[in-house]
Image (cartoon, rainbow, N blue to C red):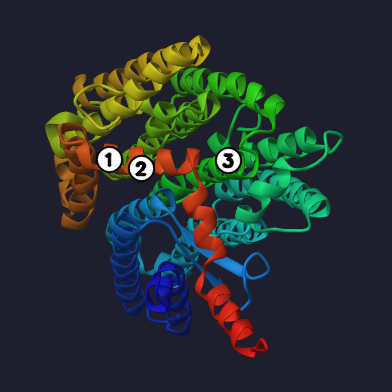
């Protein structure tokens, strides 16, 4: 691997960092900030596609920063999973930013939404591409700081209340994660995930491996919103701007699930049995509690927040099964959830613009005045429920088949039950908000909706939402590329030798080896 190829790892992280710095420098010029945001996210998407293309052709790649050889240096590494999720995150972030340009006003952009969003994307890309478990913690901190700033934009009381809950529980999770990393480092003397893969397996029988694995499950489970550590998500995700809610739902919990995949497939591939057994029931409880919580809510944005949580249970259920078929389903579901979660929150934001709110009981007749929102919401919602031929159907097929083969019938039941409950709540929202005729108690009638069509029919809003709704349809109808990528990602997780070898043969180490050989006596 050439040094130039290794630098492909840097650009998805460096581009949003540079863009955020430029946006801060132009603090008083919100239009210039918007242009910088669009350029930066577009370039990040291009760089991520180039990285995925290189990984697809040549296998996993890695780079040690600062000239330090692995496992001592700070390494970035990419396999199919990390590169693929970076592409998905960048693509959806671009759609969200386009949506945000119409959804936010000048004052909100002047308050710093663009630099904070770019900083968040830097943290997300860094988490997907790091090969160092301590730097995984660092990237979590970057996403936490930027997401907290995004959450309080606007300064409404409910935002501040949600932000406090969000920050407190995530800081607690971060502290537990740091403790787990410190204990792991104390036992092994390394922070490189590639190096940990071998050293954890060779620890003595009396080493507290199970305890550390449980600490990782608890800390990363809090960040992923796993039951019973999920309360911060439905309390927080519905409070910020729709643009912010969309990017939170699309990306933040997925970083937590991705970290669980890395930790339990590379660091603890043969250990952490207690944590893995607990993961089965935690995943099932998360699916069911999330779906039931959504059914009990009266606000569309809170409903969607609970469905995001339920989806996390589906993903972690695949990890708990741990077979290749299950990991294919998990990877596919992560990509699908990134798209659909963002689309649903964007649709909810457009409903609020058209109807003046998002309480289900206050809305009616939106289909006549806003058919585009109705169709986009229905497609995204049915995909979330797993209705064929939409994208959400295929990962659930893989997960159900994997669960039946592995004898994990509780996970199979959870996936099917959560999908059925999600279908009920999507039908309920569509019937009440979009389809039913307006009554005296409903806030919006067909005429009311028509009068707000200038906001509702914004080209930017419709193009961003339409792109994501179309994408989940296209991926469902033609799923071969995503299935191929998910299959390769699953195979690399189960056999991470190429990933480990790439880290230990990163350019910095190769250069150090060449120097040593040149200085050795002949």
Q: Position of residue 159 (x, y in %)?
A: 55, 49
Q: Nearer the viewer, mark 3 or mark 2?
A: 2
Question: Circle 3 sits in a helix, a strand or a loop, which is it?
Answer: helix
Label 1 element class: helix
The quadrant the N terminus occupies is: bottom left
Q: Is residue 88 above or below residue 212?
A: below
Return the residue at label 3. 260
Q: Taking the image as drawn, is residue 4 in sight?
A: yes
Q: Is residue 286 above or below residue 69?
A: above
Q: Which residue is mark 1?
A: 484
Q: Does 79 sit above or below residue 253?
A: below
CB contact under 8 Å: marks 1 and 2: yes
Residue 121 drawn above or below residue 184: below
**Residues under labels 3 and 1: Cα distance?**
22 Å
Residue 228 is situated, as x and y percent measured from the top left of the image, at 65, 27
- Local secondary structure at mark 2: helix
Q: Position of residue 465 (x, y in %)?
A: 24, 46
Q: Which residue is mark 2?
A: 488
Label 3–label 2 contact, CB within 8 A? no
CA distance separating discs 1 and 2: 6 Å
């Amino acid at each position: 691997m050439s040094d130039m190829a290794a630098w492909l790892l840097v650009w998805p992280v460096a581009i949003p960092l540079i863009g955020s710095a430029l946006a801060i420098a132009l603090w008083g010029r919100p239009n210039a900030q918007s242009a910088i945001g669009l350029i930066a996210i577009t370039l990040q998407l291009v760089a991520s596609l180039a990285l995925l293309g290189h990984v697809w052709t040549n296998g996993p790649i890695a780079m040690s920063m600062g000239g330090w050889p692995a496992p001592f240096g700070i390494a970035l590494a990419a396999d199919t999973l990390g590169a693929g999720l970076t592409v998905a995150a960048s693509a959806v972030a671009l759609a969200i930013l386009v949506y945000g340009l119409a959804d936010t006003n000048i004052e909100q952009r002047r308050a710093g939404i663009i630099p904070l969003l770019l900083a968040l994307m830097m943290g997300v890309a860094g988490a997907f591409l790091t090969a160092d478990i301590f730097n995984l913690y660092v990237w979590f901190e970057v996403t936490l700081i930027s997401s907290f700033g995004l959450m309080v934009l606007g300064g409404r009381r409910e935002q501040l209340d949600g932000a406090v809950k969000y920050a407190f529980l995530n800081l607690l999770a971060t502290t537990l994660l740091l403790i787990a990393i410190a204990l792991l480092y104390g036992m092994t003397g390394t922070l490189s995930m590639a190096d940990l893969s071998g050293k954890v397996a060779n620890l003595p029988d009396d080493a507290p491996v199970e305890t550390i694995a449980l600490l990782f499950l608890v800390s990363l489970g809090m960040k992923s919103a796993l039951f019973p550590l999920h309360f911060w998500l439905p309390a927080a995700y519905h409070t910020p701007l729709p643009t912010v809610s969309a990017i939170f739902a699309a990306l933040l919990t997925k970083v937590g699930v991705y970290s669980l995949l890395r930790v339990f497939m590379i660091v603890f591939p043969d250990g952490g049995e207690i944590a893995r057994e607990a993961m089965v029931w935690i995943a099932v409880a998360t699916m069911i509690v999330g779906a039931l919580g959504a059914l009990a809510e009266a606000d569309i944005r809170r409903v969607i927040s609970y469905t995001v949580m339920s989806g996390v249970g589906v993903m972690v259920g695949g990890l708990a099964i741990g077979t290749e078929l299950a990991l294919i389903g998990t990877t596919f579901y992560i990509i699908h959830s990134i798209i659909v979660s963002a689309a649903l929150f964007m649709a909810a934001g457009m409903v609020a613009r058209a109807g003046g709110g998002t309480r289900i009981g206050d809305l009616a007749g939106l289909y006549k005045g806003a058919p585009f929102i109705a169709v986009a919401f229905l497609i995204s919602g049915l995909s979330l429920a797993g209705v064929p031929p939409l994208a959400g159907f295929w990962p659930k097929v893989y997960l159900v088949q994997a669960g039946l083969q592995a004898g994990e019938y509780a996970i199979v039941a959870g996936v099917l039950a959560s999908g059925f409950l999600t279908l009920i709540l999507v039908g309920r929202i569509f019937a009440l908000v979009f389809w039913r005729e307006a009554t005296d108690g409903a806030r919006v009638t067909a005429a009311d909706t028509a009068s707000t069509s200038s906001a509702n029919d914004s080209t930017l809003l419709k193009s961003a939402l339409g792109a994501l709704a179309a994408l989940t349809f296209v991926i469902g109808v033609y799923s071969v590329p995503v299935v191929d990528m998910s299959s390769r990602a699953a195979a690399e997780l189960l056999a991470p030798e190429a990933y480990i070898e790439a880290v230990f043969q990163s350019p910095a180490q190769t250069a150090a080896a060449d120097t040593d050989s040149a200085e050795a006596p002949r």
